[in-house]
Image (spheres, grey):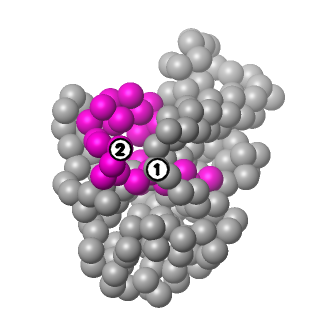
Amino acid sequence: MKNVFVLCTGRCGSVTFAEACKHLDNYTAGHETNANLVGDARLAYPERHIEVDNRLAWHLGRLGATYSNESTLYVHLRRDPEAVAQSHLARWDAKFRASMIRAYGHGIVMKTRDWPLEQRIDVCRDHVATVTANIEEFLRYRRSVTVRLEEAKTDFPVFLDAIKATGGTEAALAEWDVKHNSRTNFHETAAASHR
């Protein structure tokens, strides 16, 4: 594979996936590497690169037109939908300006006033359902594997086999035992990665 793109809703182990892939020696790996770029630069990734970015779910048409189906593998990174929705809800009021859930709740769903507290979980669930459907439809006729957060120790090795990974595969698997982007370290991680 020349390129690998990991598509997801966010809040499902994307940072962990990228950190695990950094142990491989036949691919580079990144998390939201080009997330602050526009135009052609947004989707300009080097060959033999694994990109993990939940925002790619909003660029699927351009992604599919840019990268050949024959030389690209997609990964659908999944987690229990309710757990994802609850995790997004927990970050609703975070000070991170580029919050995907608020962008969805006020931009994709056009709502100029604040959402009542009791309705925010419905927005989060809708976001998860929409992004998941976008990814599933895009992947219908493309080569892909699924990695479920809850089954990562089983699913991730299947992914490693699919890309013929070499290097620190044991260290890569060990990353799934580390919490990389939990609620407690969110503000520091987000601020550092998107300045």
Q: Quadrant location of residue 51?
A: bottom left
Asked if the residue at tag 2 contacts the one at tag 1, i.e. Cβ–Cβ closer than 8 Å, the answer is yes
Residue 133, position as x, y percentages in the image: 62, 33
Going by the numbered disc 1, the residue's amino acid type is Arg
Residue 96, position as x, y percentages in the image: 46, 42
At 41% from the left edge and 64% from the top edge, which residue is drawn? 18
Q: What mark, if any, has residue 24 been given in the picture?
A: none
- Sequence order check: which comes first, mark 1 or mark 2? 2
Q: Left or right of 78: which side holds 163?
A: left
Name the residue that disc number 2 marks: 69
Secondary structure beneath dot 1 equals loop
Give the alpha-carbon distance from disc 1 to disc 2, as whole Å: 7 Å
Name the residue that disc number 1 marks: 143
At 53% from the left edge and 20% from the top edge, which residue is drawn? 108
Mark 1 crowdedness (10 Å alpha carbons): few <14, some 14-19, many ≥20: few
Q: Left or right of 184: which side holds 37?
A: left
Residue 10, position as x, y percentages in the image: 54, 47
Q: Left or right of 83: which side holds 16?
A: left
Q: Which stretch did the figure color magenta?
A: 51-78
Mark 2 crowdedness (10 Å alpha carbons): few <14, some 14-19, many ≥20: some
Judge whether 180 appears above or below 12 on screen: below
Is 67 magenta? The answer is yes
Q: Is residue 57 visible?
A: yes
At 28% from the left edge and 69% from the top edge, which residue is drawn? 27
Judge whether 73 appears above or below 150 on screen: above
Q: Left or right of 83: which side holds 184?
A: left
Which part of the image, by quadrant, shows the N terminus? bottom left
